[in-house]
């Protein structure tokens, strides 16, 4: 009997892990960085999951960096200071949320990244 329950529970778990079709995914790329921002609305709150990937040639030289994200259509923004990349050159932040969902498919975000005396902007739009 237990074996019969395992398969449906496994299917339920896998379905829950997939991205919701209502998620808004914004992507962009610059010379040294790529960015993906996934926005999910859960229980009336807008959750922002940001992934920044360094694609430059000198990953070892980046001890920390700063970033600033601005929704140019809504006037909302957030950022991080002195954050670090993992060994693969990826930074992930999924702790950001707001109480009033306002993001739409047509919105544009600009991400400013500052590292080692360099600065770059990434424009990200909905896929």
Image: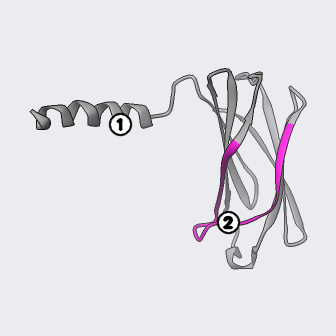
In-image side of 96 versus 120 (left or right): left
Q: Does 100 appear above or below 50?
A: above
Q: Answer yes or no: is residue 69 visible.
A: no
Position of residue 86 measured from the top left corner of the image (x, y, whole percent): 62, 67
Query: Which residue in the rendered view is the most extreme toward the left?
Result: 1
Determine the image quadrant of residue 83.
bottom right
Q: Which residues are magenta?
A: 77-95
Which element carries disc 1, helix, strand or loop?
Answer: helix
Report crowding for label 1: few under 14, some 14 to 19, many 20 or more residues within 10 A (C-alpha).
Answer: few
- Please report the residue visible at 69 percent of the width from the left and 26 percent of the height from the top: 45
Residue 82 on the magenta segment:
yes
Query: Which residue in the rendered view is the most extreme toward the front?
Result: 1
- Please report the residue visible at 90 percent of the width from the left and 71 percent of the height from the top: 117
- Please report the residue visible at 50 percent of the width from the left and 33 percent of the height from the top: 19
Determine the image quadrant of residue 98.
top right
Residue 87 on the magenta segment:
yes
Using the image as rendered, state which of residue 65 and residue 119 is in the foreground.
Answer: 65
Image quarter of the N terminus: top left
In-image side of 75 versus 100 (left or right): right
Residue carrying label 2: 85
Determine the image quadrant of residue 77.
top right
Reading the chain from its start, which is encountered first: label 1 or label 2?
1
**Main SS category, magenta section:** strand
- C-alpha gap between disc 1 and disc 2: 28 Å
Q: Answer yes or no: is residue 44 visible.
A: yes
Q: Please say if the residues under marks 1 and 2 sit with CB atoms less than 8 Å apart.
A: no
Position of residue 36 measured from the top left corner of the image (x, y, whole percent): 66, 44
Residue carrying label 1: 14
């Amino acid at each position: 009997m237990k074996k019969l329950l395992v398969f449906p529970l496994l299917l339920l778990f896998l379905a829950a892990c997939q991205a919701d079709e209502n998620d808004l995914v914004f992507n962009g790329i610059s010379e040294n960085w790529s960015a993906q921002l996934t926005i999910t609305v859960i229980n009336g709150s807008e959750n922002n999951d940001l992934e920044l990937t360094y694609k430059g040639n000198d990953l070892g030289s980046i001890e920390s960096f700063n970033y600033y994200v601005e929704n140019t259509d809504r006037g909302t923004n957030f950022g991080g200071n002195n954050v670090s990349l993992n060994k693969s050159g990826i930074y992930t932040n999924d702790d950001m949320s707001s109480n009033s969902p306002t993001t739409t498919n047509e919105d544009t975000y600009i991400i400013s990244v500052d590292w080692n005396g360099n600065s770059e902007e990434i424009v990200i739009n909905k896929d």
